[in-house]
Amino acid sequence: MHSKRGFKIPVGPQHPSLKEPESFSVALRGEKILGFDMRLGYNHRGIEKACEERTYFQDIYLIERICGICSHSHSTCFIQAVEELAGLEVPKKALYIRTLIGELERVHNHFLWLGIAGHEIGFDTLLMYTWRDREIVMDILAALTGSRVNYGINTIGGVRRGVTGEESKKILKAMDDLEERTKYYIELAMQDTTIIRRFSKVGILSKEDALRLGAVGPVARASGVERDIRRDDPYAAYGEVSFGVITDNHCDVYGRTIVRLKELMESFKIIRQVLKNLPEGAIAVKAPRKVPAGEAVSRYEAPRGEDMHYVKSNGTDKPDRVKVRAPTLANIQAVKHMLKDRFLADMPIVIAAIDPCFSCTDRIISTRDVDTGRSDVMTWDRLREYSIEWHRENGVDFSKIKTKIR
Amino acid sequence: MRILKSIMRWARVKSPWILHFNTGACNGCDIEIVASLTPRYDLERFGILLKGTPRHADVLVCSGPVTYQTEDRLKRIYDQMSEPKFVVAVGTCACTGGVFKGCYNVKGGIDTTIPVSAYIPGCAASPKAIIDGVVKLLADADKGEA
Amino acid sequence: MTKSEEIKNHLIKEFGYLEPAARTQGPRRIFMEAGADKFSEVFGFISEGMKPVMLSAITGLDEGEGLGFIYHLSRADGVIINLKTTAPKTNPVLKSVTRYFPSADVYERELRDLFGAKIEGLVEGNRYPLTDDWPAGEYPLRKDWKKKEVKDAL
């Protein structure tokens, strides 16, 4: 691929006769994207079918592993539907603990995202700092649940572990530390010209388009769409805590960054309220093995947006049907729209900005120039390198960053 | 302690290149693999570098159960690596298929498709376990036992 | 009266035939059913008349003789109208709703791959979520489908 300035970026297939389906196919005119198509399904495992062949209890562990970063979101969403079908009244204490874990998940998710966003634009220092901060949350989750990932805190009818006073104190201290770090990142995002330059006017999605294309989560909220399942369709303990729904009007990647950072501040608020008002009592009620026939629709505001589960029961110990619609799938049309008429070099950050819940580490991109007919195949890493180099050519250089990293 | 020192010396000399490939995972293990490069765990102090190309990779680190979509690509990547090459299956899914064993689009663990040199269980495998597994593999490789 | 009951009554007033199968479940869930011939008018009414509304997902169901399709329409006030329609397994034809909701594209492809639904008006494009070499006529989410057949074919 040659830029207009005449220098050559070494992109190319890993193997000359690479024939497997590319994940992204891009129609180009020079460096501009005319059309963009995605091929999904790489990690389609057949979970919904497997759910029908296992009991509700076994399904908790399967559903939790739909996505390792949103595992509590999926687990809670599913269990809420089952509890509705079984007519269970989940103890308040359990609802509070679910909320606590859910918000901790949001916190580690948003820090993770910030690091990935930095990595995509060539600002690896940000990756190192945010992921170091994230470890504070991972330690808390490991102490509370026994695992850094896939916590297994939920059971049908409640949760499996409580929170001790000692743990509570540690969490509150950690929230103070993380809040300091977050304030620093907000300052960085708002003042650093390099970041502003790379993120602004990129991946534009107007409010109108966000509504029309059904965007969810921080992507929608960064386009001024005030939509948050925690407030609109409350679940767990969200009806009893006060928090703000964060929106922004930049309608671009910068807006999505600001929304996630401010959401972190709201998460700290929620976590403090939950711990302060943690009810006494049981952490779970007994759940029946067989669930009476019926259907239920459950929703959850995952870090990436609206997660929706539909469960149909038939009076046995196995569900008749489980349908999962993860948030990223809802944002696909929005991404296609955002990339139209944009530079290929913007592709990595625009896709990263929807915080996609599919592994982006090894995606194959095929490009075809409509004018010259020339086609290329490259890996995600190559695309990222191309993007960073392209922007460096255009004056973006992180070695000149003014704000001091602490 | 002496063994650890010689591993570290070896790693610094050899500086093995690692290629990471996700064959259909939930991303849990992938995040932990990336986390092992961040300051808390710092895989790079062992001289291990994460690279993007199979042609120069010494170790292929795989996460996830093999789905029918990714099967061919996994084989292709393995074929492109030059000897000596090692494959590490990270996480329970990569080892045996994990919770997804039996799902219609899942073939099974990594060893259903390519030979595996080391298995690191865990759901997800923690960064400590990952580093431990990779370093042990390299030590064995150096001794000619892998 | 809960929000869901209010909206349910409003819809029944417009389309009396919805009444027999209409019910609410909690303050924010409505379940309704419309036959193939009536589905479009109800769907259009909700999509155009209750804006802003979002199509959260489409769930396919194997109901024995026929296939069921539930369109989960989410309103801004948090209420979800779960509008179901059915089609015979021998000829499961649906009209695409992408003109109302572009996001339906990937949900409809999923119904095609996993249930064998035929979507009229769906544009050419990649299949989702199955592989290109998945054997034809094999619909994994149908109740009578077994994994063994595919393993051999692939």
Image: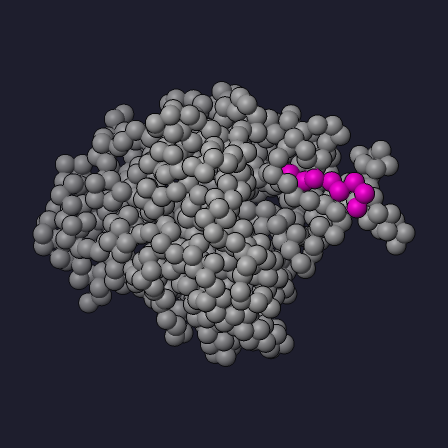
Say how many tags the image has.
Answer: 0
How far from the left and from the top, in percent, is residue C139? 39, 29
Q: Is residue B16 magenta?
A: yes
Q: Is residue A245 or residue A222 the one in the foreground?
A: A222
In percent of the image, x 54 and y 51: which residue is there?
Answer: A122
How far from the left and from the top, in percent, is residue A111? 52, 60
State which quadrant residue C98 falls in. top left
Q: Is residue B136 or residue A51 the one in the foreground?
A: B136
Residue B80 sits above or below residue A379 on the image? above
In percent of the image, x 74 and y 52: which residue is there?
Answer: B45
How far from the left and from the top, in percent, is residue A4? 42, 37
State which quadrant residue C40 falls in. top left
Q: Quadrant of the N terminus of chain C?
A: bottom left
Q: Is residue A23 visible?
A: no
Q: Is residue A179 or residue B51 the one in the foreground?
A: B51
Looking at this view, name the residue that lies furthest to the right.
B2
Residue A141 sits above or below residue B3 on the image? below
In percent of the image, x 10 and y 49: which residue is there?
Answer: C16
**The magenta stretch spans which residues?**
B12-19
How far from the left and from the top, in percent, is residue C82? 26, 49
Relative to C91, C111 lies left or right? right
